[in-house]
Image: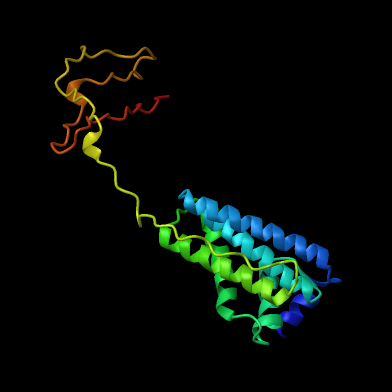
Amino acid sequence: MDPFEDCIKKGRLKPVEPDIDEIKKEILTAEEELTRARTCFAEKRFEDCLVQSYFAMFRSARTLIRKKGYRDTNMYSLLTGLKKLFVEPEELERHLVDVLSLAKEQKDLVYEGARCHFQDTQAILRNSEVFCNRVRELLAIPDLPPIPPMEEIELEDEPPQPNFDDFQRPIDRGDRDFPPARRSPGREGNERPWTTPDSMPRRRPDSPYPFRPRETRPKRRD
């Protein structure tokens, strides 16, 4: 079965009446998302920029489906509707739909804790601008002019690495005098000696940190 017809049959794409006011409101919200994405990019908050860029494309894509009389329920139905209603008639470039799908995957990775780099974020942001303007052309609403392009921002590709020599190293206490060995209170036969210099493993010569041995408790004898 055709994926588009399958989405309609299973309720993933629901028939609705096109509402120009709702479409215009959604487009203006997408423009606000894109503006926030530009601000985040200028402030080097690349993760927030990628998320805002995705939502700008997502809202814009939903207006195209809404104009054709359908409402999506998930990302799969949205992409299927775009390909059937706009890519196949050659009204929308396929690579823009691929960018939307890629931005969705990157957004999910950011939510899982991934970090974004300058080049990847800039590419998503630029394509988001192209996507939003292309949607406005397809909608052909007189009160929605094209979004002006963002000014060029020159940033370093990667942030400078910190100089670890500037950090104060911990004091080496390998020659410190330890008190004599004592035993912790407990049942007879179940005591454990406290740590003494003789029980400590030798420190690696290339490590500035002294070893902290893990204390082990003997098994309890019943």
Q: Nearer the viewer, residue 6 or 47?
A: 47
- Decide: is 177 above or below 221: above
Position in image of residue 206 (x %, y %): 15, 39
- Decide: is 37 above or below 62: above
Position in image of residue 145 (x %, y %): 68, 67
Q: Residue at x 22, y 32 (%)?
A: 209
In the image, taking residue 88 as reference, residue 152 lies left or right, namely left
How many tags in the picture?
Answer: 0
Q: The C terminus is located in which quarter?
A: top left
Q: Which residue lies most toward the bottom here?
A: 89
Q: The N terminus is located in which quarter?
A: bottom right
In the image, taking residue 128 as reference, residue 173 lies left or right, namely left
Q: Nearer the viewer, residue 44 or 186?
A: 44
Q: Residue at x 22, y 20 (%)?
A: 196
The reply to whether residue 13 is visible in this rendering is: no
In the image, taking residue 73 as reference, residue 111 lies left or right, namely left
Position in image of residue 58 (x %, y %): 65, 64
Q: Nearer the viewer, residue 172 or 35?
A: 35
Q: Residue at x 73, y 75 (%)?
A: 140
Q: Residue at x 57, y 74 (%)?
A: 96
Q: Quadrant of residue 137?
A: bottom right
Q: Which residue lies most toward the right here?
A: 17
Position in image of residue 63 (x %, y %): 73, 68
The reply to whether residue 2 is visible in this rendering is: yes
Q: How is the image coloured?
A: rainbow
In the image, taking residue 12 as reference, residue 188 lies left or right, namely left
Q: Quadrant of residue 85?
A: bottom right
